[in-house]
Image (cartoon, rainbow, N blue to C red):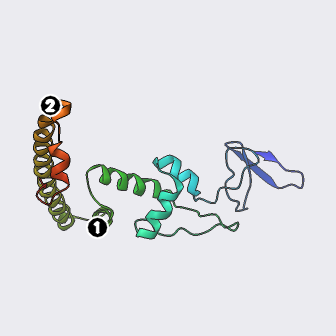
Amino acid sequence: RSQGLAGSRADLDDGDLKMEGASRPALDSIVRYRVNNGGMRSSEVATQSGVNVQTLRYYERRGLLQQPPRSASGYRSYPDETVEIVRFVKRAQEHGFHLDEINELLHLAGGGPDDCDTARRLAQTKITEFGEKIRDLQRMRASLTEFASTCARPRADRHCPMLQTLHTDTGRP
């Protein structure tokens, strides 16, 4: 502790000067930068969560993120937990969930046994959808493999059955 000029006492704490009894916002660790009001700017959230700023705006419009309050200068001021919410959304997308499903998962994230049952049902539905997509992809692959094998004819005799089939309604896998 040190004695101030007018007899006031000041505490030195982590390099920041704080007056006893005075309530001041914490200063950012980089000199000449703004005062830290406890929120994060869009660019900070985007960088820490691995998305771009437009993704944050889109998630706000979709209701995945709440609209953050604005600072006095008009900047969005996101709460710290926003980074974890965005990371949750990205991980859920990596598992094949769509944003509407992710919104439901977000509402379930804080819950108990009933929420776990609902999340399990969502996952089982997704697994069934994956099975259907896999069967469709396998059917398309088999069809294309068959088409490609018929393209081995000499160039002069070639009339591509794949292109012919794609031009007709019967060309569905």
Badge 2: how crowded within 10 Å, few (<14), some, or many (20+)? few
Rendered image: mark on residue 104: 1
**Quick check: 7 above or below 107?**
above
Disc number placed over residue 18 in the picture, else none: none
Residue drawn at x 13%, y 52% as measured from the top left: 136
**In this rendering, position of residue 159 left or right of residue 38:** left
Q: Which residue is mark 2?
A: 152
**Mark 1 residue type:** Glu
Q: Residue, x 18% and y 67% (percent of image)? A: 114
Assign a secondary structure to mark 2. helix
* Classed neighbour count for the residue bearing mark 1: other residues with Cα under 10 Å, few (<14), some (14–19), many (≥20): some
Q: How many marks?
A: 2
Identify which residue, 57 or 44, lies in the foreground: 57
* First in residue order: circle 2 vs circle 1: 1
Look at 20% across and 55% down and name the residue there.
Answer: 167
Q: Is residue 68 above or below residue 151?
A: below
Seen from the viewer's position, the closer of residues 77 and 160 is 160
| Amino acid type for the residue under numbered disc 2 | Ala
